[in-house]
Image: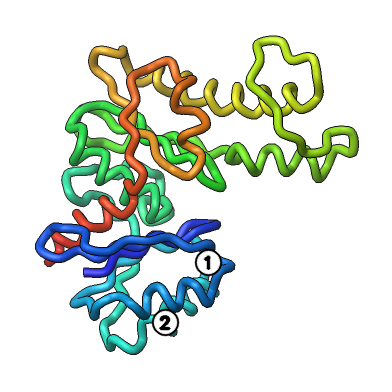
Amino acid sequence: MLLLDVGNSRCKWACVENGVWTHRGVAANTEWLALQQSLAALPAPARIIVSNVGGEAMAQRLRTICSKWAVPMEFVLAQSGQCGVINTYETPARLGSDRWAALIAAWRRMRRACLVVNCGTATTVDALSDKGEFLGGLILPGITLMQQSLSRDAAQLAAAAGDLRDFPRNTADAVHSGVMRATLGAIEHQYGLLGTAESTGCVLGGGAAGQIQNYLGMPVERVDNLVLEGLQFIGEASA
């Protein structure tokens, strides 16, 4: 089984055989040739399970790459309920497939109330109840996206490396600290709404997870391939 997690910026993949990941990799969505070469080197899968939030053009590229295997691509859509998770989104199918797969993987790991945080191009902060109900969540610009928007739209705030400070006294630190505090504050606020440290967990993933993990004021379990894990469980459940 080939699992594909296509985000806004990167495509991650893993091959699963008898429940074991035998191959894995990642490429930027713009690295078309590298992605093509990497997938071409993989063994022929019996199934291809895909979460795609990278748009229709990316879906077409993947269809072209994978067409040699003559295996239909199964694009995951959020359901009203699946793998023990209940979807309470107002329109369940409108929930992003990456968020849905991550929720399923987090529930399999935690089996209790938890936040599911993914720090990528966007930062998502989703909540699961102790009964496996998806309660809802936040979407905010990711750390890099916030920094880039300030650099692009505010002439006095050119991008520069900064540090997290309580009271920044230079522009680079002020921008970095503002972006970090906005992200940390959103996560910690939702954690406080969900429950206490004794009964609530937090699963953290995404490319920018390492920037914020040590600053969060709650116990955190770091999982770098949460969406791929969720795709594996979805695929196994529908085998």
Image quadrant of residue 45? bottom left
Image quadrant of residue 151? top right
Question: Is any atom of residue 73 visible in this view?
Answer: yes
Indicate the amino acid at tag 1. Answer: Gly
Which of these two is toward me, 24 or 70? 24
The residue that disc 2 covers is: 65
* Residue for point 54% across, 21% down: 185
* Residue for point 41% across, 35% down: 117
* Residue for point 76% across, 27% down: 172
Assign a secondary structure to mark 1. Answer: loop
> Colour mode?
rainbow
Residue 46 placement, left or right of 126: left
**How far, Cα to Cα, is label 2 from label 1?**
16 Å
Is 169 situated above or below 207?
above
Is 50 situated above or below 145?
below
Front position among marks 2 and 1 = 2
Indicate the amino acid at tag 2. Answer: Ile
Quadrant the N terminus occupies: bottom left
Per the rendering, the mark at residue 103 is none
Residue 143 placement, left or right of 216: right
Assign a secondary structure to mark 2. Answer: helix
For label 2, count other residues whose C-alpha is less than 10 Å away and answer few (under 14), some (14-19) or many (20+).
some
The residue that disc 1 covers is: 55
Q: Residue 176, how many percent across, how many down?
A: 68, 28
Residue 47 placement, left or right of 153: left
Q: Residue 159, how many percent across, how many down?
A: 77, 38
Q: Residue 94, how many percent across, how many down?
A: 43, 54
